[in-house]
Image (cartoon, rainbow, N blue to C red):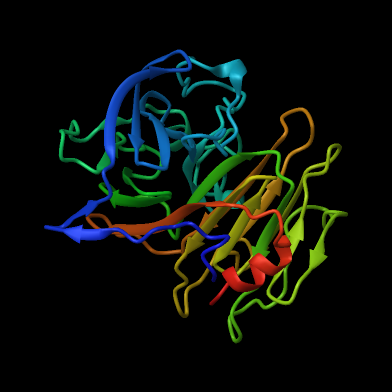
Amino acid sequence: MTSHFLTILACSLVVGTISCDAEIIRTSWQGWEEAWIIRSKTAETVIVPEIGRIMQFGFRDKPGVFWNNRKLAGKSPDPLASEWQNFGGEKVWPAPQNCWPIFGIRDWPPPSGFDSTSSTILKTPDGTADTIKLLWPEDTQTGIRMTREISLADSSLTVTTHWDRLHPGPSPLAIWTVAQLRHPEECFIAKPSPGVLPPQLLKLSKDFPPSLRELPNSHSLTRDSKLAYKVGSSGNHLLWADAETLLHIHILTKSNAIQPDGGSRIQIYTNADDNPYIELETLGSLQIIPSGSRISETLTYSLLHRDPDIPLDQIVLKMFQP
């Protein structure tokens, strides 16, 4: 990749911490009294523990890329709500979704212990901290307690999710991360590396989206204004693009892993115009989780300045490497 369209800078490691001049600030945000901002010289991310979400991520001089539902700004989560409180932002659910009723979890809205339960700051950041750690109470339906570690280095956001099984519960399960983003110009989902199964793009809605295009190492699509669509892949790269900014998501693949949703490692969901957002989703491998054990997944969100003189297809060809 050439530096004229990718502007991620390397950070030096100093005594076990990331030396990127990041600062962590406690503030109020969009009606929530407690929010935490991790801010580097180039980018910032907003975390709202009350609703358990990373609510925004973006360059400091541009609009953030995450979609937020302004109708719910400042509202508290309601674990007994019969309708989904679609706050927006980035969060974690258990996969596969089609097994929720089998496991005794409601089929919709998402499990309350993951989606509509407040988290707490595990340790109040001090002047030398570069990571926010969030802790959720145990989800009684799965016996899982979730911890998330969120750090920012220049324009790359790294998020590690840990699940600790405290009591017996349903298995196998996978860590499913869902990031809701603003309406894009175009999105790209990587094809798998040679030999990784399944090799084809997975149709996870009734039909493939009408905007679907195939490239040598990916497929692209745009958001449809009338209907929702969803596709999946066993690849490990996703890209969101508007006129000025790119968001690249990368998740490490695991050999011989069993993936939910027909073998999906990554997915794109596009919503209709009632709420004009898309979702870039990553799924960990399905795992048996015995009591007393832990599983973890790490992914990276990287912001890039887009060079308007370079076609998106060309950027993707260079960026989506196995």
Q: Is residue 97 above or below residue 113?
A: below
Q: Is residue 1 above or below residue 133?
A: below
Q: Would residue 104 be visible to someone looking at this image?
A: yes
Q: Would residue 265 be visible to someone looking at this image?
A: no
Toward which corner of the image does residue 33 lie, by quadrant? top left
Q: Position of residue 191 (x, y in %)?
A: 66, 72
Residue 4 relative to residue 288: left or right: right
Q: Position of residue 32 (x, y in %)?
A: 41, 16
Residue at (56%, 18%) from the top-left corner? Answer: 72
Q: How many marks?
A: 0
Residue 164 relative to residue 318: left or right: left
Residue lying furthest bottom: 195
Question: In terms of depth relative to the viewer, which is nearer, 259 or 310?
Answer: 310
Q: Position of residue 268 (x, y in %)?
A: 66, 53
Residue at (23%, 52%) from the top-left corner? Answer: 19
Residue lying furthest left: 15
